[in-house]
Each structure stands twice: as structure tokens, then as C-alpha cells.
Amino acid sequence: MSNEEKYDGEHIVIGKDRSKAQRFIAFGAILVVYFFYCYNFMLDTFVRPIMTTSIADGGFGFTMGQASSIFAVMSFATVPGTIIFGKLSAKFGKKRTLIGIALLIGTTTYMPLLHPTSFWFWRIARFSTGLALGGVFGTAVPLVIEMFPQKYRGKLTAIMTSTFSLAMIFGGRLYGFLGNSNWFFLVLTAVIPPLVGAILILLFVPDDKGHTEKMQKKASDKGEKINYLNMYKGKYLWIGIGVIILSGANFVAYSGFSNNATTYLTSVLGMSATTAGAIYSLQGIGQLIGYNVWGFIADKFGRKKPLIGMIMSAAFVFVYMQLGLNNEFAFKVVSLLLGFNFGFSGAWGAYYTELFPKRFNALAPGISFNGGRIISSFALPFVTGIADTSAGMTGVFSVVMAVFIAGGVLWMFLPETLEKAKKPNAATKAVS
């Protein structure tokens, strides 16, 4: 181990006695659960066709509205899930909480298979799954943060975030292979791996129970409890509001563009679905690369440097709007670059955790990230609705650009959290 690593090791909170290899194995165990947390959001795509097929033809007989509402309640439940599991993490430890979350994801995802034609059973089951999914980001991210020196955190949390793109690719390939007739097995692919992940976390992730109790004691000695009310005291109230708005800007702008990109290409420009799909898929590839590159930049140069990507996203949406039907190659290049810049949020897991005092690690990242979903749930219908006005899709993309720029400006006023590692002095070298 180098002198720099020994110095930087003071940032490690749990698993200090473990080798770097053991800590990366622990990261892999957490990543299994995180990947299939992302993958679970794809279940809508897999099951919706069979849901809306008539019972006579082997489906569930749901209407499109019913199918949409089933997955809407899941998305809504992620917000209270974030709060509930954040409090459990602060009380019982993040490792134990994440194991419980993984078990809940597996069991609640399996529940609808017991009565697949019941609309209300599906709603209850997916709401329960949504609660569990809401706890993953805020529990898994701080666990990784506490296992590694600061110089790794941006890259590792970016890898975690980028698994959403990988889950889309993996899910699409698996769905193409199994098809609608094997919907039962597709659901099982979202049930079994989280249960395996729970076992891996139990075996390989260091226990943070002692650290949790230590933080609770420190807070108690100050006459304070570890809860959201105390986390948002003083300057942290404004930081907390700022990051929730920043996350909301990301959700609104990203979804406002991505949800309408293929519609714009096919309905407005008149491209074929095949061409539009090929262009859109390059955005996903660019995003996968972007998450990791911006994560590296956040570790090397500062947590706020990726705001360049947020502002550049607005610039490339503008370029996207200037292209025409005969600019297929240019569309592909711009789509790739758009996806790359969309990866600006890759290191937010590390950034959001570091913005608040360490005793709030179990609470800070989850609410800071998922709190933005509250904003997007109200703002997105308004943004999408612009397409039905005289402004059309141009109006939608104009709002998207404005939100990206506003988010980047807001980010400029938030604190920097990256601490530059000090080079060990001669005395430190002698001791080493």
C-alpha cells in the first residue's frame, strides 16, 4: 500500500482492516443488488404486453390505463421508501437494511405471480416493491462511500449509476430472447438475483453496526437525534433544498427529452421507427460511457466539474433541433454526445453524501436524489403537455434546454466537497 493510500485511508469508515481486494469484492456484492434494482424498473416493458392482452388470448385483460397505473404507484412509492429506509439505516445500520431491502425486492416482485390477473393485487405488490426500491440508492451508496477513500468514490458511484444503462441493454436482449410468452420467467429474472445479492452482502460487506451506534452516541451526547429534521438545520437546509431542486431539474430535463426523442424523430421529422430506434440507442451507449468519465473527472478535479456536462446537454439538445430528415449520421453523433453529457450525474451519490455531516450518511443521498422525483412528478406532465400546444415539440425541447441550464447554474452555487489528498511529509514516510 502506498503512502498516499495510507493517508487517504483515514477517509475509510468501515472495513479499515480489509485489503483493497476485499473491499472491491464487497463493492461487487452491493453492485449485484444495485444492478437488479435498476433492472426492476424494466419490468413494465417486459410485462405490459401480456397485461394488456385479453384473458381469452392468455393475457391478464387489463386496459392500458390500468397497466400504466400499476407502475405509476410503484414510482410514487419510491419517495416514502427513501424516507422509511433512510431512518432504518440510521438506526440499524446500512448493511442490515440493504439486506432487508434486497429480500423485499425479491419477495414483492414475486407476489403478482400468485394472482397475475388481479389488478388490485398487482397494484399492492408493485407499491410494495416501489417502497423497497426507494431505499436502495440511499443505503447502497453510503455503504460504498464508507468503504473507500475519497479518491475512488466518484468513480465507484458512477459505475453504480451507469448500471441503469446496462440494465436497459441486458433487459432488452433478454426480452428479445424470451418474448412475451415467457413473461413468467422474465419476472423471475427480477426476483432471484436480489435474493442472491442479499446473501453476498451478508458474506462480504463489512458490518457498519458499530459505526452506526457510534454516530448515534455522538448525536445523543449533543442532545441530537439522527433524523431528517436535524439534518436540515442551518446552512444544510439550503443545501438540502438545492440538491433536491438539482435532482428534480435532472429528472425533468432528461425525461422531457428522452421520453419524446423518438416521437420527435418519427412524428415531426417523419423518420422510420427503425432509424429513430438506432439513433436513440446511441444515446444509451453515450450515457454509459459518460457516467464513468464524469465520475473520473469528479474524483480527479472536483465534484462540481461535471456541471459542464449538464450545460452542454442543453447545447446538444439545441443542435439536435437544428438537424433535418436527411441528417441521419449527424443525429447519431449528436445522440451519442447527448448521452455522454447526460452522464453528468454519475458521481452524485458521492457528492450528495459528502455535502452533509457524516452522521447523516444514511439519510442524505437517498432523499437528495429521490426527492427530485417529487418535482418531476408534477413538472413532467406540464412539460410534455406543451407538445399539444402551438409550441409543439420545439416548445418541449426549449423548456428542456432551459431546465438543464438552470440546473447547471444552481450547481455552481453549491459547495465543493472533494478534498485534495495531502502528500505525506517526511515524518509520515519515516513511520510508514
Image (spheres, rainbow, N blue to C red):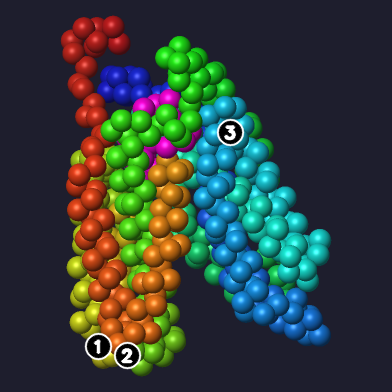
Q: Which mark is residue 288?
A: none
Q: Which mark is residue 324?
A: 1
Q: Identity of the amino acid at label 1?
A: Gly
**Is most of the magenta stretch helix, strand or loop?**
helix
Q: Which residues are magenta?
A: 347-364
Give the labeled residue for mark 2. Answer: 269
Q: Are marks 2 and 1 in contact (CB under 8 Å)?
A: yes
Give the labeled residue for mark 3. Answer: 88
Determine crowd level at label 3: few under 14, some 14-19, many 20+ residues with C-alpha closer than 10 A. Answer: some
297 vs 172: above or below: above
Extreme-bottom residue of the structure: 270
Determine crowd level at label 1: few under 14, some 14-19, many 20+ residues with C-alpha closer than 10 A. Answer: some
Query: Percent position (x, y) of residue 213?
Result: 54, 18
What is the secondary structure assignment of the residue under circle 1?
loop
What is the secondary structure assignment of the residue under circle 2?
loop
Please state if 363 lies on the left or on the right of 106 as rendered. left
Q: Which of marks 1 and 2 precedes in the sequence? A: 2
Q: Which of marks 3 and 1 precedes in the sequence? A: 3
Query: Percent position (x, y) of residue 259?
Result: 42, 73
Q: Is residue 299 visible?
A: yes
